[in-house]
Image: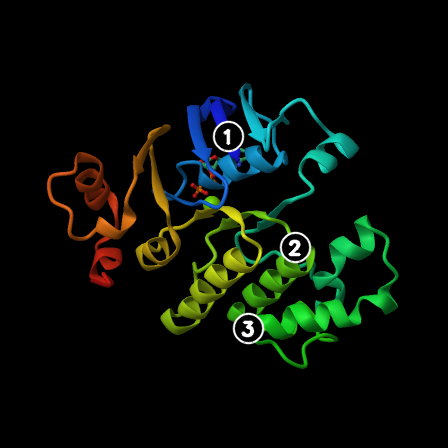
Amino acid sequence: MIEVKNVSKAFGSLQVLKKVSLKIEEGETMVVMGKSGVGKSVLLKQIIGLSKPEEGEIWIRGKETTQLSGEKLYEANKDLGMLFQGGALFDSMSVFENVIFHEHYHRHTPLEHLRETAQRALHSVDLKDVMDKMPSELSGGMKKRAALARLIAYRPNMILYDEPTTGLDPLTAQVIIDLINKVNKELNATSIVVTHDIVLAIAVATKIALIDQGEIHIVENPKEFFTHQGNDVIDFFKTILPQQCLDKRVV
Ligand SMILES: Nc1ncnc2c1ncn2[C@@H]1O[C@H](COP(=O)(O)OP(=O)(O)O)[C@@H](O)[C@H]1O
Ligand SMILES: [Mg+2]
């Protein structure tokens, strides 16, 4: 279980998160939605420990991690992986080195033992003949898939996805949606998916959290999103989603 308890984070006078709380049970996929700039990426960074909140607690499988750093943080987060916004491959490394980064640089497995691991991970996201390419030689969709292959090779069973389909055309976005469902299932993952994409949200969510002005609203049953009448949270949600998201409705 991942639990965020009363977390606040500010940058100077900008109060981004105000006592935000969120609980993700084992095996659940919590989709987090909200307008640009509300603090979704900041929230994920607090959870993974890349940035520290001024107050509040982050619990990762029963361990409070906000006070941890270095090896202790690494140990507490070893089953937690993140797909960064934009894919975030290391530009100066080949696709192969990116995919086996964790095994090689953290677990110190020699590179020559890892080609098969990388091949398998790339195969599961339908990427062929890219091992020795540089990220700059890949399209946007291929970069996302390579970043997903890195997650698969790492095999975390808690995964944070930051806007995995943003900037992709609808067909490529659908490929990524199917892959997220496949990866989550294969790894039996507990995950958080930050997105603006309602099609992605409905396809993967077991619950949806909406962040607005530092507050969180939860939709317990996303499958009812388009058909449900008279639910205050869902009605509110629809008013803040861009119209093009609602136009893509899949009911
Ligand atoms: N390291 C930082 N320093 C200063 N301001 C930041 C920093 N990171 C994020 N912010 C600000 O916090 C707000 C929330 O950012 P972010 O979480 O990236 O939004 P989003 O919901 O679009 O992911 C934005 O106004 C952003 O400019
Ligand atoms: Mg963001």
The colour scheme applied to this rendered structure is rainbow
Say which amino acid is labelled 1: Glu
Q: Position of residue 69 (x, y in %)?
A: 73, 29
Say which amino acid is labelled 2: Arg
Q: Quadrant of residue 35?
A: top left
| Residue 92 in view | no
Q: Which residue is mark 2?
A: 155
Which of 28 and 149 lies nearest the eye of the viewer? 28
Rendered image: mark on residue 73 = none
Give the CA separation, mark 3 to mark 2.
24 Å
Say which amino acid is labelled 3: Ser
Q: Which residue is mark 1?
A: 3
Q: In percent of the image, x 24 and y 59: which residue is there?
A: 244
Answer yes or no: do the residues labelled 2 and 1 have beta carbons within 8 Å? no
Q: Which residue is mark 3?
A: 139
Answer yes or no: do the residues labelled 1 and 3 have beta carbons within 8 Å? no
Q: Position of residue 83 (x, y in %)?
A: 57, 53
